[in-house]
């Protein structure tokens, strides 16, 4: 996988003697700098993307009931200003901290903040599930390449890879939540917690878990496919390496060769992928949360689309993009910590 | 080898043609050895046939809700309606066949746009060493960071006019960075070969170098990559349509799922409405993925995929 960042390749001309922790600090510093560059680009892009909007954006606020006359006047002035002036105003406040949702008439960041934790719970659970299962399947399939486990698991993996995650979600609702035939309704299919329960109590945790199982399974099934394909490919790459022959020649058992020698070396691409995949999982969360009425940032995105609330959409898009930039940096740093060759 | 060596009498043009023909036959033979790749071709051929024959098998009247009012709505499969009916009383089988046209058209058209953009940016960033090259490379890296589905969703929502053309455009202009990165890497490796040095020494223009020497060498990989892009685009179209950002007047598998969800198919147990569109998406995406992987492994045996 070509997952090395542009900075990593630029760094290769620079030969810091020893590598050491100083090299790592320098690497992280440069990586943060390039992340900042990406962030600037994204901010610019975000501005012009939402200026493609046809029609009169101020008109969208007329329908909002509980917006104050003062806010409305301010918004109208802002939206009627020339583009360059708007751009200048945007540069001074790129996060739109004062942004008012056209749909709810509330500050957008209040809306976003209130919806963040369910998405974090959902993405965390599904990434954990997908990683644990995907890596194991990939290792086993790659180690006995061409064997029956490899054939079956690669087939199933490609099948899940082709599945729209929200469709899987709909099927899960159909079977486990609505109840089909002899199956009773096992899991709830809406919300993240039953009403009237404190989220930080024992009952609250159980209720959140109940609501998260089905959407997390729908997301995990699709992404574990990718992890297992990558893990399989990197194990296959390692199979022909000489150090494995050496390890076998020493008389090590097959599973020891696999666990202690092959897997650590093959893990790097998968570790990178886990971080880099966050962008795709966010994409999946939009539809899956919509299907399950799971009140996170994905469902909020869907609501922003149906309500034509572009201020809210802009804030959400920024949150998603910045999370991906941060995860990209984390991926590079994680790999640099694990593999000293990359730093120097 | 069944091909006879080109005789000395052949003109250079005819020799080139013979060589290309032989290469193509060799390629077809190694592709045919890929069982999963052939399975992908068969599935795809089947769906292409259904898409082409849809107007013959199911007259357009069957999709007109004003003409299906007498039918039972959301009826389970029966002798008359093999896959049951939707919330407008239309035969799900007929809608499914017509939807194949929209889904395949979007997939192929958007991937074509993405292929052209990705190849241009990729070759450009690999060939030009100065400001232009690094600018194109940065642009690719930046666009790779922006999460794909949120970008597609926001762009479609901002553009607002929900025609098929808009969807094709949105998916086409967003899915190129992966291709560009691949093409750039390949261009860099081609640029290092001696015949490019020769072309440069003989005074070949940048255009000549890129079009006559680099492009033919990156094209096979681009085609394999584009096949995989079609899979991604079809999945993304399904997502867009499901979120209500598709063409409301045109049935695609995504809009079917959107309508099924809107009609409460999941909570009322109308499995005959939910299953078929999803299975069609899976099969077509799987077909393109299998073909793309087989092409990749024929072109680059180091990948070692079976």
Image (cartoon, coloured by chain):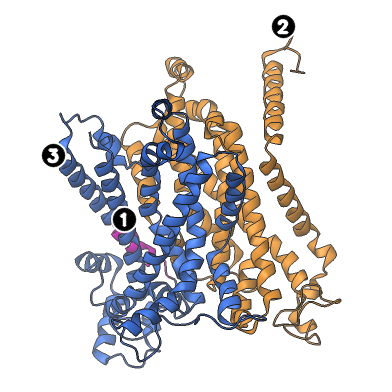
- Have a look at marks 2 and 3 and say if they share a chain: no
Work out whether residue A116 or residue A305 is closer to the camera in this orientation and state it.
A116
| SS at badge 3 | helix
A60 shown above or below B143: below
Label 2 chain ID: B
B100 shown above or below B262: above
The chief SS type of the magenta part is: helix
Q: Is residue B80 left or right of residue A222?
A: right
Q: Is residue B224 left or right of residue B70?
A: left
Q: Residue at x 60, y 72 (%)?
A: A171
Asked if residue B149 lies in the magenta stretch, the reply is: no
Task: Specify the label residue A327 is tagged with.
Answer: 1
Tint of chain B: orange
Q: Which residue is mark 3?
A: A22
- CA separation, marks 2 and 1? 61 Å
Q: Nearer the viewer, mark 2 or mark 3?
A: 3
Task: Specify the label residue B8 is tagged with.
Answer: 2
| SS at badge 1 | helix
Q: Residues within 10 Å of mark 2 (few under 14, many from 20)?
A: few
Looking at the rendering, the stretch of residues picked out in magenta corresponds to A42-53
Tell which chain the image draws in blue.
Answer: A
């Amino acid at each position: 996988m070509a997952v090395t960042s542009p900075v990593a390749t630029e760094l290769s001309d620079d030969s810091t003697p020893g590598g050491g922790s100083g090299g790592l600090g320098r690497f992280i510093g440069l990586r943060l700098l390039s992340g900042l560059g990406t962030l600037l680009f994204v901010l610019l892009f975000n501005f012009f993307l939402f200026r493609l909007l046809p029609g009169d954006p101020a008109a969208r606020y007329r329908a909002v009931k509980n917006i104050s006359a003062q806010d409305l006047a301010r918004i109208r002035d802002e939206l009627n200003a020339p583009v360059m002036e708007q751009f200048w105003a945007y540069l001074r406040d790129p996060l739109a901290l004062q942004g008012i949702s056209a749909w709810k008439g509330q500050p957008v960041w209040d809306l976003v903040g209130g919806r963040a934790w369910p998405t974090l719970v959902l993405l965390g659970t599904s990434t954990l599930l997908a990683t644990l299962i995907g890596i194991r399947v990939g290792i086993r399939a790659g180690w006995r390449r061409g064997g029956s486990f490899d054939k079956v698991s690669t087939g199933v993996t490609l099948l899940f890879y082709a599945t729209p995650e929200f469709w899987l979600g709909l099927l899960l609702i159909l079977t486990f939540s609505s109840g089909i035939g002899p199956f009773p309704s096992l899991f709830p299919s809406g919300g993240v917690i039953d009403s009237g329960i404190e989220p930080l109590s024992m009952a609250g945790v159980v209720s959140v878990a109940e609501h998260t199982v089905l959407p997390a399974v729908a997301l995990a099934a699709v992404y574990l496919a990718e992890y297992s394909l990558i893990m399989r490919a990197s194990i296959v790459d390692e199979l022909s390496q000489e150090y494995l022959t050496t390890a076998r020649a020493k008389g090590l058992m097959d599973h020891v060769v696999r666990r202690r020698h092959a897997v650590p070396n093959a893990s790097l691409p998968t570790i990178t992928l886990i971080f880099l995949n966050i962008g795709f999982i966010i994409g999946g969360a939009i539809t899956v949360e919509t299907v399950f009425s799971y009140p996170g940032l994905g469902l909020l995105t869907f609501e922003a689309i149906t309500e034509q609330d572009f201020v809210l959409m802009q804030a959400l898009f920024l949150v998603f993009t910045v999370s991906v930039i941060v995860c990209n940096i984390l991926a590079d740093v994680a790999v640099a910590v694990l593999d000293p060759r990359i730093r120097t | 080898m069944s091909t006879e060596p080109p005789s000395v009498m052949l003109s250079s043009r005819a020799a080139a043609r013979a060589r290309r023909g032989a290469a193509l036959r060799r390629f077809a033979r190694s592709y045919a050895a890929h069982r999963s790749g052939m399975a992908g071709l068969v599935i795809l051929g089947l769906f292409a046939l259904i898409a082409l024959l849809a107007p013959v098998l199911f007259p357009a009247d069957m999709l007109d809700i004003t003409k299906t009012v007498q039918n039972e709505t959301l009826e389970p499969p029966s002798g008359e309606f093999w896959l049951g009916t939707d919330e407008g009383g239309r035969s799900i089988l007929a809608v499914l066949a017509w939807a194949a046209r929209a889904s395949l058209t979007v997939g192929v058209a958007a991937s074509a746009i993405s292929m052209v953009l990705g190849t241009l940016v990729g070759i450009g960033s690999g060939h030009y060493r100065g400001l232009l090259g690094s600018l194109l490379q940065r642009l690719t890296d930046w666009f790779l960071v922006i999460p794909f589905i949120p970008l597609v969703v926001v762009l479609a929502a901002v553009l607002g006019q929900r025609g098929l053309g808009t969807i094709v455009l949105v998916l086409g202009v967003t899915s190129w960075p992966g291709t560009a990165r691949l093409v750039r890497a390949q261009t860099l490796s081609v640029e290092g070969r001696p015949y490019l040095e020769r072309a440069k020494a003989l005074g070949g223009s940048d255009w000549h170098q890129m079009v006559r020497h680099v492009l033919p060498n990156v094209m096979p990989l681009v085609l394999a990559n584009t096949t995989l892009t079609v899979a991604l685009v079809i999945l993304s179209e399904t997502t867009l349509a499901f979120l209500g950002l598709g063409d409301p007047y045109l049935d695609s598998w995504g809009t079917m799922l959107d309508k099924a969800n809107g009609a409460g198919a999941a909570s009322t147990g109308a499995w005959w409405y939910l299953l078929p569109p999803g299975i069609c998406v899976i099969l077509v995406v799987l077909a393109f993925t299998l073909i793309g992987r087989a092409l990749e492994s024929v072109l680059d045996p180091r990948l070692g995929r079976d």
